[in-house]
């Protein structure tokens, strides 16, 4: 396995993604992790990430310098390279010209890190994003690549097995960057490409059996990818000692509750407790229009309902959750510019002072790895590739005050939108697609009659992680069909608009 030390780059998680794609297990730890922990982790190599700081800054993040004496191969990326230059006896300078964006890298040595690249004339496009750069090699180092701007764009010390590159191999704009990282972990560190989901499932099932023993597990099932796959995996491991709770908060999509019950009860034969708490939620939400207040009410009510159900079901030793690796690292990572963007916690909002132990089988996985686990477990596409759905559900998509009637109108329109998106084969290309019911009435004409009804907005975005998003370029013909169907089939809507804002500066949801 590989250790990635995080110096606060917005790309650190991408480094981990690429290493995992090379089928080598890796973890991210903060830059100041103690040498004892690093030694205990037992990595075969260390990658130093980029970061927003300058090595000259007063509080420049520095790793324990003993990492250079572990005898492990080290790869420094961007800030990681400057740090190596600065601490190993070279000279780093703040360049007058900031280099940002694509650059042409000329490779001067096609060995190890740069072996087997699919490039012509030893030239490849790389992604740069830095101010400082290494101007003089530390003793024992040689330059192995350059750009017009940087005579030392990559360097290595073969004897001490240290490599450093100024560009970012982890981003897709760096052509063959994935090969370079694979070269580092396979060729240089000697890691075998054995990390895959079949192995993961086998060892996780054994681990769950061992951890849980004869005890019982309660799982809050939301119907989303993470909790669904977690439930199926845990069920494989411990069978009927797992009980799932699915709460209908009245803010779900059309047919959603029925589908979840059918899948988990009829298909997987799990102990599923279905709690219809719609009325409770809607009562609490009556008359509330402020989005943050709605969120709070929905979150709190979920906790009350969950506690209630738990009491009725008896005692459990473990609570299962579909927590993913990005949530885990976010809580330990350096406060770089990447850390502050995220504003939501994607959990149903479980109580903080719970009296059971947590069982989180996906703590080490990324979302697409969880999807692979689901597929490997034979789960249907509709679950494995489901779009993310916010905890507060349709509660933040009926803008303003929520009522059962308005929710029903929204559900019908939303259902048509998704049906057409799937029919046009666009579902998998889109990150999220949904309808927002607007708090305005507009004038229309139907037959000979004037109408005065609701307007709704269609929202569909493409994205890789939900942090940034672009509005989806759905073909006009598809939009036309959707609009026609909604206006004709949904009583209460007489106007459909398409949202063409990107994030930033917009957000994906409207509330
Ligand atoms: P925004 O609207 O901030 O949304 O661009 C980014 C992602 O987060 C989801 N989202 C939420 N998820 N509770 C959640 O669990 C929330 O309160 C919440 N608000 C937004 C949104 O659907 C998108 O995937």
Image: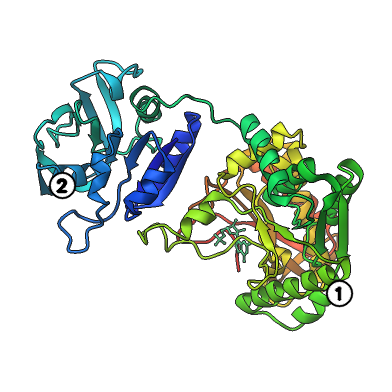
Horizontally, is 386 left or right of 216 in the view?
left
Q: CA distance from mark 2 to mark 1?
A: 63 Å
Q: Which mark is residue 313?
A: none
Secondary structure, mark 1, is helix
Q: Nearer the viewer, mark 2 or mark 1?
A: 2
Color style of the picture:
rainbow
Q: Which residue is mark 1?
A: 279
Nearer the observer, 405 or 130: 130
The answer to the question of whether label 2 and label 1 lie on touching residues, with beta carbons closer than 8 A, is: no
Tell me what residue is drawn at x 8 percent, y 34 percent.
Answer: 139
Is 366 drawn above or below residue 439 in the view shown?
A: above
Q: Is residue 439 visible?
A: yes
Between residues 332 and 505, which one lies in front from this camera angle? 332
The residue most toward the bottom is 287
Q: Position of residue 23 (x, y in %)?
A: 50, 29
Ligand 1, by image quadrant, is bottom right
Nearest the viewer among 484 and 210 is 210
The residue sitting at 74% across, 57% down in the picture is: 222
In this view, the residue in front, 218 or 226, is 218
Mark 2, residue position:
87
Left or right: 271 as drawn, with respect to 396? right
Label 2 CA crowd tier, 10 Å (few <14, some 14–19, many 20+): some
At horizontal 17% and vertical 60% (from top left) the residue drawn is 57
- Which x, y percent locates residue 59? 22, 63
Tell me the quarter of the picture where residue 476 sits.
top right
Q: Which residue corresponds to the image point at 61% horizontal and 60% vertical from the top-left?
A: 346
Q: Position of residue 186 (x, y in %)?
A: 40, 24
Q: Residues within 10 Å of mark 1 (few under 14, many from 20)?
A: few
- Of pointers 2 and 1, the one earlier in the residue sequence: 2
The answer, for residue 10, to whether it is visible in the render is no
Mark count: 2
């Amino acid at each position: 396995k590989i250790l990635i030390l995080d110096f606060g780059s917005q790309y650190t998680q991408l480094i981990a993604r690429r290493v995992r794609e090379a089928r080598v297990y890796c973890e991210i730890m903060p830059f100041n992790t103690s040498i004892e922990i690093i030694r205990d982790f037992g990595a075969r190599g260390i990658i130093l990430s980029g970061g927003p700081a300058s090595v000259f800054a007063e509080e420049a993040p520095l790793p324990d310098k003993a990492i250079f004496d572990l005898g492990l191969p080290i790869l420094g990326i961007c800030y990681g390279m400057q740090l190596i230059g600065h601490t190993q006896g070279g000279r780093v300078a703040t360049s007058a010209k900031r280099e940002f964006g694509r650059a042409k890298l000329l490779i001067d040595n096609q060995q190890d890190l740069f072996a087997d690249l699919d490039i012509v004339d030893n030239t490849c496009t790389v992604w740069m994003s830095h101010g400082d750069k290494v101007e003089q090699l530390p003793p024992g180092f040689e330059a192995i690549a350059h750009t017009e701007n940087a005579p030392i764009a990559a360097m290595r010390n073969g004897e001490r097995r240290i490599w450093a590159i100024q560009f970012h191999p982890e981003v897709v704009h760096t052509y063959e960057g994935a090969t370079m990282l694979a070269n580092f972990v396979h060729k240089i560190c000697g890691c075998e490409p054995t990390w895959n989901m079949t192995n993961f499932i086998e060892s996780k099932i054994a681990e769950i059996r061992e951890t849980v023993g004869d005890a019982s597990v309660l799982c809050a099932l939301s119907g989303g990818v993470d909790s669904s796959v977690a439930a199926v995996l845990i069920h494989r491991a411990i069978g009927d000692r797992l009980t799932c709770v699915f709460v209908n908060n009245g803010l779900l999509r059309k047919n959603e509750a029925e589908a979840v019950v059918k899948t988990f009860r009829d298909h997987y034969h799990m102990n599923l407790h279905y709690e219809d708490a719609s009325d409770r939620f809607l009562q609490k939400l009556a008359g509330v229009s402020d989005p943050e207040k709605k969120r709070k009410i929905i979150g709190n009510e979920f906790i009350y309902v969950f506690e209630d159900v738990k009491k009725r079901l008896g005692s459990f030793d473990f609570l299962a959750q579909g927590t993913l690796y990005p949530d885990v690292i976010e809580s330990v990572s350096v406060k770089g510019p990447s850390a502050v963007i995220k504003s939501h916690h994607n959990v149903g909002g479980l109580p903080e002072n719970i009296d059971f132990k947590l069982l989180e089988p996906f703590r080490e996985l990324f979302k697409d790895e969880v999807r692979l686990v689901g597929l490997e477990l034979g789960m249907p596409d509709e679950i494995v590739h489901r779009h993310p759905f916010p905890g507060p559900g349709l509660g933040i998509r009926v803008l303003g005050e929520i009522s059962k009637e308005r929710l029903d109108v929204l559900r019908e329109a939303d259902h048509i939108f998704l049906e057409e998106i799937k029919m046009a084969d666009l579902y998998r290309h889109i990150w999220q697609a949904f309808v927002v019911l607007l708090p305005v009435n507009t004038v229309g004409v139907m037959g000979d009659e004037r109408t005065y009804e609701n307007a709704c907005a269609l929202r569909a975005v493409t994205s890789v992680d939900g942090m940034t998003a672009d509005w989806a370029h759905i073909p006009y013909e598809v939009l036309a069909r959707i609009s026609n169907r909604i206006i004709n089939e949904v009583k209460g809507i007489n106007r459909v608009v398409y949202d063409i804002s990107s994030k930033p500066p917009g957000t994906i949801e409207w509330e």
